[in-house]
Amino acid sequence: MANLELLETRLDEVQVASDLENSRLGSRIRVPKTSEIVADHFRGQIVRGELKEGDSLPPEGQLMSSLGISRPTLREAFRILEAESLISVVRGSRTGARVHAPSVELVSRYAGYVLQSLGTTISDLYQARLAIEPQVVRWLATKPDRLSIKRLRAEIERLRVLLTADRYDDFLEAVNEFHATLVDVTGTKTLTFMNQLLINLLARHQSDFKHRHPQDRDARRKGLQVGLKSYEKLVDLIESGQVEEAVRHWRLHLTNANATWAAEDEGGRLVDSLGA
């Protein structure tokens, strides 16, 4: 209720400012449209977590009445939020708009468009990962943390179960989860976000790569077994605090992986998010 009262107060202030602007010939002050104010209010609630994923906004009639705005104004505000993927509106539904929390996936798609427009190559993406993860390994091995090690070993166990069950596609998806966890356990939110964005873009390429370069079952299993041993060795080195050895091992692991995923005929490909 307090939030709606604040919004009503802001709308009143905007009306006063609008009247003042109209009374001044040649004024260059831009007064936000009412729909922008309404959209900004709900955007703030979503970003701050006051409105959660899956929550429903009040029905249109209730919002129009409580805010004192017209249906076209409210729907324009909803269109703004829909364009930002923060709500979805089912036309004709008796319930309010459905809330969606901001997601890395959405940002990854747009980032892919930007990188593609800049002519960014797949090799460039893998070089970025090579710049991030060895430094993360250095941090983790310098001050091994019990909970971090536990999380990483849990990811390795999941990989082992998938490999034993011959679920190779699921294994590759879980490998990306291992890479994500490796950075996430540092607790650095900005780096974790950037890394997840990068992983999402790499996953798109890896999916296409598998279709262009199919492997027979035995060769595929052998390669995944080698990878699993490398992950196990990394966590052992981190846990024992062998900083330089851990960094050296992981840099070599990533370099070898890059040589496969971004080989000459692959590395020169442009990032492609249009088909994602």
Image (cartoon, grey):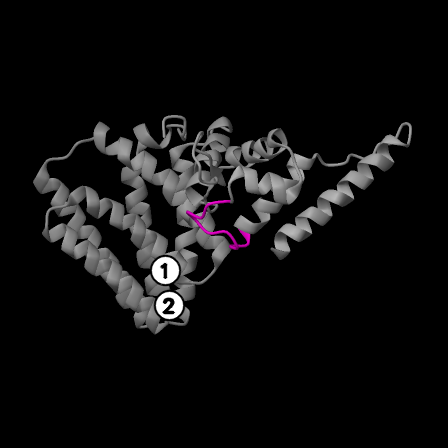
Towards the viewer: 69 or 147: 69
> Can the viewer see residue 276 in this picture?
yes
Quarter of the figure with the C terminus: top left
> Is 96 positioned to the left or the right of 148 in the image?
right
Q: Residue at x 72, y 49 (%)?
A: 9
273 versus 61 height, above or below: above
**Looking at the rendering, which quadrant does residue 79 occupy?**
top right
Residue ID at (50%, 51%): 51
Vertical arrangement, residue 45 with respect to residue 259, above or below: below
Determine which residue is flagged by label 2.
141
Residue closest to the eye, 211 or 251? 211
Q: Position of residue 228 (x, y in %)?
A: 20, 54
Secondary structure category for the residue under label 2: helix
Q: Examine the image and state in which quarter residue 147 appears.
A: bottom left
Q: Provide the residue span drawn in magenta.
A: 47-57
Mark 2 vs mark 1: which is more N-terminal?
A: 2
Residue 195 is situated, as x and y percent measured from the top left of the image, at 42, 49
